[in-house]
Amino acid sequence: MGDRYPALLDEQILSGQGRSARTRAKLLRAAFEMLANDDVSAITVAGVTKKAGIAVGTFYLHYPTTTDLMLEVFGGFAEHDIKPALPTSRMGSGLFSEMKAEFVEIVAAFRRRRKFFRAMFTFRRQEERANEMWLRYSARWAAELSAAAMSAKPTPDGFPEFAGHAATAFADEIMTRIYIDDLFGAAFAEDEANDERVAELLAFSRQRLLYGVDPDPSLITINGIAGLSPPVTNG
């Protein structure tokens, strides 16, 4: 995860597609690479075209503005590299184990591409169309999680939909706090050894919310999930 979309763009650039399709892929790949290493303000027509190795005027044959380019980059990344960590099992240890395995992937991708995700969240705050796009994806992921909650046990009307959105929002918020806001410090966010720790916390919380039961304690391999705490600051 986290590398599927850029790999797809690389494939399109090297494929036998038409020149226009390859040029578009080059612009998207250049913008993705810049966002993965800098921030939204770095995306200019001159900067993207220079990195893509194409003429400035060619940009406008494909995109009216850099905002439209970034919208396609974020949409492509969301489509190919973000998923809701939904187990295929509906009972037993599979619930927690499968969600944890998917969350490990998600957390690792978030850690590796912290600058890109930071740019994505910044763009959401700045551009209404980006936020609308993210909400559409969130609603789709929430619907998938709602279906899981509905299949778990009888619940009050409306609860599965609520649980699906709550599960999506919780993971979104936790990942943002840890990997964008450095809630536990930059050293924690950058340490690969914490991927499984965070994944277990997220999988534990999701199982409790969607299925109403906690996982078997023997499945939790990382000690101190409850010990996560923000760094202490003076004043």
Image (cartoon, rainbow, N blue to C red):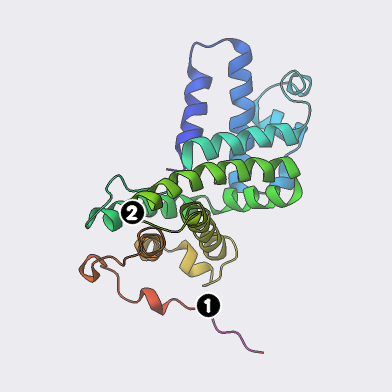
Taking the image as shown, residue 221 lies to the left or right of residue 74, namely left
Q: Position of residue 65 (x, y in %)?
A: 78, 31
Residue 31, quarter of the rendered image: top right
Crowding around mark 1 (Cα neighbors within 10 Å: few <14, some 14 to 19, many 20+) is: few
- Toward the bottom, the furthest residue is 235
Q: Residue at x 40, y 60 (%)?
A: 206
Q: Residue at x 48, y 15 (%)?
A: 15
Q: Tag on residue 230?
A: 1
In front of the other: 120 or 31: 120
Helix, strand or loop status at disc 1:
loop
In front of the other: 8 or 225: 225
* Quadrant including the N terminus: top left
Taking the image as shown, residue 231 lies to the left or right of residue 147, namely right
To which residue does mark 2 refer?
A: 152
In this view, 80 is above or below 63 = below
Callout 2 amino acid: Ala
Label 2 close to label 1 by CB (< 8 Å): no
Residue 34, quarter of the rendered image: top right
Q: Position of residue 191 (x, y in %)?
A: 42, 64
